[in-house]
Amino acid sequence: MRALFIAFLTAAAGVCQVSYDRLLKPEQENWLNYSRTYNGHRYSPLSQIHRGNVARLRPVWMYQSWNTESRPRFETTPIALEGILYITEQPSDAAALDARTGRPLWKYSREIPPDVRACCARVNRGMAILGDTLYLGTLDGHLVALDRITGRVQWDTTVVDYKLGYSITVAPLVVKDKVIIGVAGGEFGVRGLLDAYDAKTGKRVWRFWTVPGPGEPGHETWTGTSWQQGGAGTWTTGSFDPDLNLVYWGTGNPGPDYDGEVRPGDNLYSCALIALDADTGRLKWHFQFTPHDVHDWDSNHVPVLVDATMDGRPRKLVLVANRSGFYYVLDRVTGEFLRAAAYSRQNWAERIDAKGRPVLRPEAKPSREGPIVYPGFHGATNWFSPSYSARTGFFYVATREEGTRFFREPVSFRLGSVYTGGGPSGIPGVEPKGSIQALDPLTGGKRWEFALPSPPWGGVMATAGGLLFGGSTEGAFFALDDETGKPLWNFSTGGWINGNPMSFAARGKQYVLMPSGRVLIAFAVE
Amino acid sequence: MVILNGIPNTAMPPTRLFGDELRLLAAYVRSLANQPREPLPGNPALGEAVFRGKGGCLRCHMVGGEGARMGPELTRIGAIRGAAHLRQSILEPEAETPNSFAQYRIVIPLPDNFLMVELRTKDGRIRGVRLNEDPFSIQIRGLDDRLESFLKSELAELIRQPGASPMPSYRNTLGARELDDLISYLLTLTEE
């Protein structure tokens, strides 16, 4: 009997433990990575909710966050594992919820020092999981390992000193036995980096500086000491190709944002995609979308990995709909530029040349007069996730159309102060708008578009049910036909949607989840 | 600071002036407080008669609780607008419809700009001011003051009329004297 009992316990532990193999091939009902799979598709293979029954989708529970943040932005993508959701809340809290009722099972609360600087609200986008441990990045620059059963802290390691302007908002990415985590702080003169930590001990295994120091390749793209405040944050979760053993991660704007005069040069590796060896953190290749950016067009996007035949040749591709208004297709083995196309209104580049470099329009440069530039400083899209559906073969992206007047104002760097060198203002009389777009992944050509009356802050998720879920700034959560863009269902959440949809199943029933305002809402077909 | 930041939720946008320019502008604005009041171009008592009679202004505007709701309330209009602006508003109502996109905001949840819309439903056409909108529905205040909401799927057509105003031009309605009198009356409306 005793032997049987022990055997049962061992088996149970075996089921629950999230191994690296499970991260590589997550079960249909679970959501174990920020984008569900390493390829960044944010696609759910569940099809219980489909075009035929989505009209009957109803809210089944709501989880109200009791945080007191003055700027509510619920950006979490929960980890869903066997009927339990592991979520994060503002500013850097975590909780486990019963997936059928939303009832909390434990909570982890972290006191954030008042002098932590966050450019754009005190947010967190989610956790990573390995074994029985959850990994949480915190605003005060730490990486914390939490026991998924109790929420107890297993280890707490300092990634960066927040007093230097850093913060952490990104959901980490577990690769093999390592936790990869990036930083924010591009508006406070930080020097960007991407780190990997031993998942068991919290010891740092490698660090890649996204702004190279003296003697390192790429350092020559900075002038004088400007590299020390070079920015290039890494605040949106990357992707991973296990066959190539490469981690793909986007980098943010150079600092100061709008005053490029103090940093002549291309300013590597800002506004770029970097491909790093997962074991060593060594740079395999980089592609810089916007050399010497002066419009705050962070390239902090989830890179979407797709294999396809292009121009008659099978290719391993990485796809990025960039904040700059251009859609890019790159070879992810070599970083070779293959194609770019504008997917949103833009007036800052004549074109992208054969090597992938933008041919600039000088009049779009920030100045005292403040030229009107499209896209605006929040970009044609932003951190929120795109989605790729192998079912339709479309790349989906929530798109913003909102011009900005860009002003340049010289600024001196002061530790802990905003270091932007100017600022944006709106365009009187012009009402911004947005859309959800389906693009041809190989050309960036528009397949369909669903109009939004104001620019979105919510991402999208395609499902095997033939649906594309998305959200609007006014709080409409909706499902579109993934092939045509036709709206099939919507629900007015009454809050600002500033997050990504995700889906999971518990006890055989599919749920779709969307955060809005301070509320996480679960929907199911009843 | 008011010049730099504007006044949230009003027509006053932030400006981007720095250093000396900002100081000079602030000094100029302060000097305005010492200026003599603008002389009235006409007779306010006669202007009130135009306002209530020939102009029909109370059909759309409210003064001291009297009148209608479609247009901006005018109870304190003399305290916030000068003669030139009032003249332009009466002669060319669409020259400057209110909008609030001079400022760059992090979130833009509607409603926002003043926007006239015309909706075609199965029962006919409705014109009004947009109060709110999301991808699936629109809420308006009709020209008859009725509050209405429509699902976009119920509409045959939704026409946006940016820059349009429901106010007619009085260029061919009022004579020069009547216009001066009306402006004079409006300038006397300064009570809380």
Image (cartoon, coloured by chain):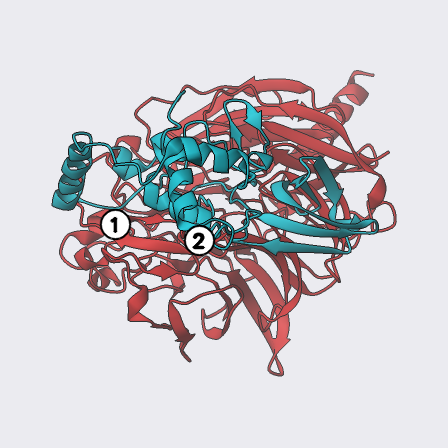
Chain colours: A red, B cyan
Residue A47 shown left or right of residue A513 in the figure: right
- Give whichever of B168, A516 is nearer the camera: B168
What is the secondary structure assignment of the residue under circle 2?
Answer: loop
Mark identifier at residue A256 = 1
Residue B111 locus on image (x, y percent): 56, 40
Q: CA distance from mark 2 to mark 1?
A: 39 Å
Q: Amino acid at mark 1?
A: Pro
Residue located 71% across and 51% down the image = B119
Q: Position of residue A371 (x, y in %)?
A: 32, 60
Residue that protrudes farthest toward the bottom in the picture: A312
Disc 1 is placed on an element classified as loop
Look at mark 2 in the image and give the residue it sits on.
B95
The quarter of the rendered structure image containing the C terminus of chain A is top right
- The type of residue carrying mark 2 is Ala
Q: Residues within 10 Å of mark 1 (few under 14, many from 20)?
A: many
- Looking at the picture, does residue A258 appear above or below residue B25? below
Q: Taking the image as drawn, is residue A34 in sight?
A: yes
Residue A175: image location, x then y, percent = 52, 47
Can you tell which quarter of the image residue B160 is in?
bottom right
